[in-house]
Amino acid sequence: MISGNVARFRDAVIVGGGVIGSACALAMSRKGMSTLIVDNASVGKPASYGNAGHIALEQPTPLASLAVLRGAPGRLFAVGGPLDFRLRDAASWGPWAIRYLQACRPDATVAGTRALATLLAAAGTAWRALVQDLGAPDLLVEQGHLLVWETAQAAARGRASWSAAETGAVRLRDLSGDERRTLQTRVAVPLADGVAFEGTGQIANVSRLLATLDEVHRSRGGARRKGRVVDVREVEGRPHLTLDDGATLTPAVVVIAGGVGSGALMRRAGHVAPVVAERGYHIEGPPGDWGDLPPVVFEDRAMIVTRFTDRLRASSFVEFARADSPADPRKWARLRHHARVLGLPLAEAETTTWMGARPTLPDYLPAIGCSRRIGGLIYAFGHQHLGLTLSAITGELVGDLALGRTPAIDLSPFDIARFERGWRGS
Ligand SMILES: Cc1cc2nc3c(=O)[nH]c(=O)nc-3n(C[C@H](O)[C@H](O)[C@H](O)COP(=O)(O)OP(=O)(O)OC[C@H]3O[C@@H](n4cnc5c(N)ncnc54)[C@H](O)[C@@H]3O)c2cc1C
């Protein structure tokens, strides 16, 4: 539990200034706490920048499931799919994979779905409140998204799989004639079939979101400092941070929200935190004549195309590797190949590339809660493919924890202690 000194000192350091840390800092500053974000900004643009911008409320079933496991061989990069493993980095993902197999037990998947569904059910409302608080309601675009198949076989498989899937409050329907025609005029290959999802959304511009979070946080007295936190321990009943430049910080509250970097810090604090880097790639360029379509998933290509205010982004891949290993240029080449075949307006000369890591725990549930080892230490990381979607609700929950209030959602499934001895999946 957080000790009673939290409300009295009201000072907090948030480790990590990605979308999760920024949302936490904003929620805490809104509640009157003075907040400092410490971010190791020198290591490139994180997942919070490079993601597909999709508010994916339709995905309560964790990817730790027998169905995903059975489908894995057919989804390997070597046979044209998105899934890859960097063999030289096997030490970073091998032990994680053993835990992942345990988390694929059917009862663990059912429990995980129930847990994730509670977060996703609150995520849309939290997002509406967050963009209002930021004074930027246009950042959230609630126009659903589209998903298409290029062959009749893929469509039959995809429809069967989606109709059996748990999608929470999100509804699927057939594409309207207009949607079908508009899509077909945008892509150069014949589309066999497609569906529209109602109840999902997108962020209009992820870079602007991050800039606005920072701006409003500062306007409330929040601060940001560059630096890498290298140690966290307890000194005289408070969390004590050491930075790579030798500085030390001893606030009343520390929030570990460093994405993949959270694992090392949580281990320093005495926790078992098997977070892995699930790396993804995007290419991005001017939107050309793509228009203002909502995000479009090309399911046969495992690729999502998102129109942001000023750019068009095509994202894909799940690559298990160390976060800091070199990028694999074959992934950008494959994205370019898809863009060429589909006739997307992502001309090579004007296209930029990006690679970054999703922070993922073996059961594909985030870790959100209070440390039982260090008083005043809160954690919020491991949001896997759903970090943007879950950032607003995570901020609210962490804000409650920091003030010693009981959050509206039961956080026991997200307790990091679940990975300690005796763990058999969620
Ligand atoms: C290709 C791709 C597409 C995606 N699409 C979507 C999507 O459409 N919708 C969705 O909901 N999610 C999506 N995601 C997932 C989402 O982007 C992530 O879950 C989310 O960004 C994680 O946010 P974070 O703040 O936890 O971590 P990060 O974005 O990784 O930020 C962590 C920050 O902490 C800093 N840090 C780490 N360690 C330290 C340290 N020791 N000291 C100081 N600072 C530190 C890092 O430098 C970084 O700035 C996607 C991810 C990828 C890769």
Image (spheres, rainbow, N blue to C red):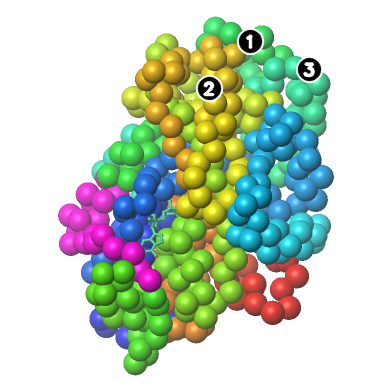
Q: Is residue 224 magenta?
A: yes
**Along the line of sight, the residue nearer the viewer: 119 or 232:** 232
Where residue 106 appears, x then y in whole percent? Answer: 81, 57
- For the residues labelled 3 and 1, the Cα–Cα distance comes to 13 Å
Three-letter amino acid code of the residue under disc 3: Ala
Disc sitting over residue 36 in the figure: none
Where residue 237 appears, x then y in whole percent? Answer: 37, 90
Packing grade of label 2 (10 A; few <14, some 14-19, many >=20) is many
Tell me: 366 left or right of 398.
Answer: right
Where residue 369 appears, x then y in whole percent? Answer: 50, 71
**Number of numbered discs on residues:** 3
Closest to the camera, between mark 3 and mark 1, is 1
**Along the line of sight, the residue nearer the viewer: 56 or 241:** 241
Q: Which badge, 1 or 2, is on the more N-terminal residue?
A: 1
Tell me, yes or no, whether the two marked residues, 1 and 2, touch with CB atoms within 8 Å.
no
Question: Which residue bears the numbered disc 2?
Answer: 336
Which stretch did the figure color magenta? 212-230
Residue 340 found in image quarter: top right
Question: Which residue bears the numbered disc 3?
Answer: 152
- Helix, strand or loop for disc 1: loop
